[in-house]
Amino acid sequence: MKLLHLTFSPRGENSESTQLSQAIVDQLCNQYSISHITSRDWRLHATSAIDANYATALSSAARSSDEGLSYEGSLEESERLICELEEADMVVIGTPMHNFTVPATLKTWIDLVVRVNRSFTITPSGKVGTLSNKPVYIAIAAGGFFGSEQSRQPDFLTPYLKAILGTIGLHDLRFFSAQGMALDISKVKVQRQKALDRITSIGTEIIESEGT
Ligand SMILES: Cc1cc2nc3c(=O)[nH]c(=O)nc-3n(C[C@H](O)[C@H](O)[C@H](O)COP(=O)(O)O)c2cc1C
């Protein structure tokens, strides 16, 4: 089985979400026969954005096909990243919450892999994904708390990922979060451990999905 591991924190190895996602990868390696892992650290893409050629291609894609487009720049990168997603049997994403939602790095990746006439098509009944469904494990780190009645901030991150990854055919999302990472260190340790404890259930009969 092939596993794709994507991380989006600017904090590299010190990142809570990267470490949590690595714990998921380790657990999956214990549970399944993983023959290949592709790891992509999106720190390097922090300032990248889609280019004009790509934006133009997608803006007119609803009325024309990809034929005749020059596969360079963002379009070439988009193709490579979509192929990477297609080849994976399972995907692990590590992401911080930034301003109630995904960080800009993850948004850039989304802009590159969610491509009309390629990873989804437009039909009279709506957008339909072309990717085959596969498990996507998502590790989230947040300074505060989200997703419960007591939390004092909105969560645009998990509903957004469900909507946008569902658009390309990825419906099997499994969320794991380390919340309260901005609290004092003793509380952080407790929250971190809670998240890690949930990860140990991966591969057993009961795989819970937060927020569903
Ligand atoms: C630009 C920015 C925006 C943030 N916005 C939020 C937020 O809206 N809600 C929250 O709970 N934490 C927020 N945080 C805190 C991070 O989510 C928290 O520090 C998390 O642990 C970072 O994960 P990482 O270590 O994987 O980068 C923000 C941090 C940054 C840098």
Image (spheres, rainbow, N blue to C red):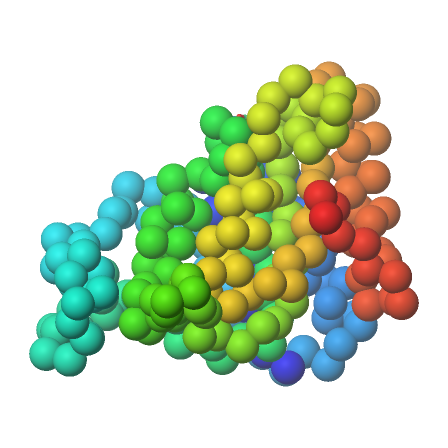
Res 84 seen here: no
| Residue 101, above or below 171 | above
Residue shown at 79% from the left, 70% from the top:
30
Relative to residue 64, is residue 102 drawn left or right? right
Find the residue positioned furthest to the right.
205
Q: Tell me which image quadrant ligand 1 sits in.
A: top right
Q: Nearer the viewer, residue 183 or 140?
A: 140
| Residue 22, above or below 144 | below
| Residue 119, above or below 34 | above
**Residue 4, percent across and down?**
54, 68
**Residue 155, percent across and down?**
59, 32
Q: Nearer the viewer, residue 161 or 191?
A: 161
| Residue 91, above or below 142 | below
**Residue 83, percent across and down?**
40, 76
Within the image, what quadrant is residue 177 found in?
Answer: top right
Within the image, what quadrant is residue 159 found in?
Answer: top right
Res 94 seen here: yes
Relative to residue 9, is residue 77 drawn left or right? left
**Residue 188, percent across and down?**
75, 27
Within the image, what quadrant is residue 121 found in?
Answer: bottom left
Residue shown at 75% from the left, 20% from the top:
150
- State the quadrant of the N terminus: bottom right
Relative to residue 63, is residue 175 drawn left or right? right
Residue shown at 23% from the left, 52% from the top:
50
Residue shown at 37% from the left, 67% from the top:
124
Labels in figure, total: 0
Relative to residue 159, is residue 22 drawn left or right? right
